[in-house]
């Protein structure tokens, strides 16, 4: 996570300072972003190996859920986890992955430059290693209710503000 934060700060600085592309700074940042994305993929795979099956989909009661608005349920199902830390970790993974993918897009990286996932994962109901930013954001939102209840109705500071802000 620290690598991601440092990288995103460097990318922000490069754009804020309107860095001359001829200096190669953006090329170095692109390479770093792809490396960090690969590391994130490896962490995901290791986490799934150790904790497979720690997430499942449930269908919320529209009368007893926070994932509802005037039009009804936001999603037909929500995600529940083995424990709070699983939900939190997956939401943080998704938010970091979204930020990295968006940074690569900002640096005009075309899809052919973004590395293929190390392994195509079938980790249903989780998306896992994907470039589907919208899907990852939806996964964060579908995790809110479980994490909110498990954190004893506290979603402040780093607990869930970053993932929600990213989603």
Image (cartoon, grey):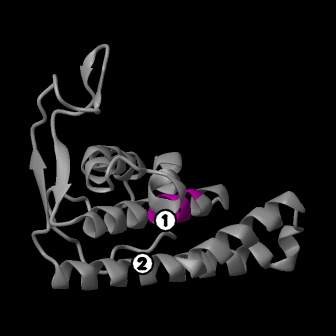
Give the mark count.
Answer: 2
**Dominant secondary structure (helix, strand or loop) of the stretch shown in magenta:** helix
Residue 54 shown left or right of residue 20 in the figure? left
How far across and down, in percent of the image, does residue 111 sit? Answer: 48, 61
The answer to whether residue 48 is magenta is no
Nearer to us in this view, 150 or 99: 150
**Mark 2, other Cα within 10 Å: few <14 / some 14–19 / many ≥20:** many
Q: Indicate whether 55 appears above or below 39.
A: above
Q: Indicate whether 103 appears above or below 57.
A: below
Q: Indicate whether 166 appears above or below 130.
A: above
Q: Quadrant of residue 38?
A: bottom left
Q: Residue furthest top?
A: 70
**Mark 1, other Cα within 10 Å: few <14 / some 14–19 / many ≥20:** many
Residue at (80% x, 79% y) in the render: 24
The answer to whether residue 99 is magenta is yes
Q: Which residue is mark 2?
A: 40
Pointer 2 and pointer 1: residues touching (CB < 8 Å)? yes
How far across and down, in percent of the image, does residue 104 sit? Answer: 59, 63
Residue at (44% x, 84% y) in the render: 39
Residue 45 shown left or right of residue 163 in the figure? left
The region drawn magenta spans: 97-102
First of labels 2, 1 by sequence position: 2
Nearer to us in this view, 76 or 28: 76
Real-space Cα distance between discs 2 and 1? Answer: 8 Å
Q: Which residue is mark 1?
A: 96
| Element class at badge 2 | helix
């Amino acid at each position: 996570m620290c690598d991601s934060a440092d990288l995103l700060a460097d990318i922000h600085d490069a754009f804020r300072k309107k860095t001359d592309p001829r200096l190669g700074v953006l090329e170095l940042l692109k390479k770093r972003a792809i490396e960090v994305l690969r590391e994130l993929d490896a962490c995901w795979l290791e986490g799934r190996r150790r904790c497979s099956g720690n997430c499942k989909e449930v269908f919320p009661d529209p009368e007893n859920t926070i994932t509802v608005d005037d039009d009804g349920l936001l999603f037909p199902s929500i995600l529940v986890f083995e424990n709070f830390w699983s939900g939190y970790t997956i939401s943080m993974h998704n938010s970091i992955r979204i930020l990295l993918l968006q940074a690569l897009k900002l640096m005009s990286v075309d899809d052919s430059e973004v590395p293929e996932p190390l392994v195509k994962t079938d980790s249903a109901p989780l998306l896992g290693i994907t470039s589907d930013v919208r899907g990852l954001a939806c996964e964060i939102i579908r995790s809110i209710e479980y994490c909110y209840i498990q954190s004893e109705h506290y979603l402040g500071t780093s607990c869930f503000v970053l993932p929600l802000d990213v989603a």
